[in-house]
Image: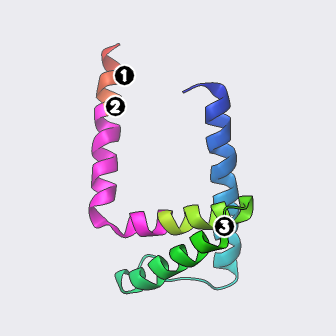
Amino acid sequence: MKKDLRMACFKFHLACFNKLEKKEQEGFKGWNMPENKKELEQGLLEHIVKGFSPDNLVDISNYCNMLWNLDHGAKERVLKKLREKGKNENKD
């Protein structure tokens, strides 16, 4: 990955991380409980309707992150891809 794209990803990651850390400190929790999926979906839709300001894009991304991580198979798929990538990189 080229340096400018890597830096853009890192800056966005930090913005998302900082926002979630603040919310966690304010007492928000339960994002990883399957019974909260509908509430997360609703929050995502509400934020999409608000538009695409930089701060709102961070919120949208965080909702997507939480919903994506509720998919219990997602972790296994990511780990599998990372293992495959590591094997391919070690061949060079």
- Residue labelled with disc 3: 51
Quadrant assignment for the N terminus: top right
Residue 50, image x, y percentages? 66, 73
Residue 49, image x, y percentages? 60, 73
Please, what is the three-letter code of the amino acid marked with disc 1? Glu
- Residue labelled with disc 2: 85
Q: Residue 70 or 42: which is nearer the viewer?
A: 42
Mark 1: give few (<14), some (14-19) or many (20+) Cα within 10 Å: few
Please, what is the three-letter code of the amino acid marked with disc 2? Lys
Q: Is residue 17 among what the camera can see? A: no
Say which quarter of the image contains residue 81. top left
Magenta span: predominant SS is helix
Please, what is the three-letter code of the amino acid marked with disc 3? Gly
* Residue at x 70% of width, y 57% of height: 15
Mark 2: give few (<14), some (14-19) or many (20+) Cα within 10 Å: few
* Residue at x 29% of width, y 66% of height: 72
Q: Which residues are magenta?
A: 65-84
- Residue labelled with disc 1: 89
Q: Is residue 80 among what the camera can see? A: yes
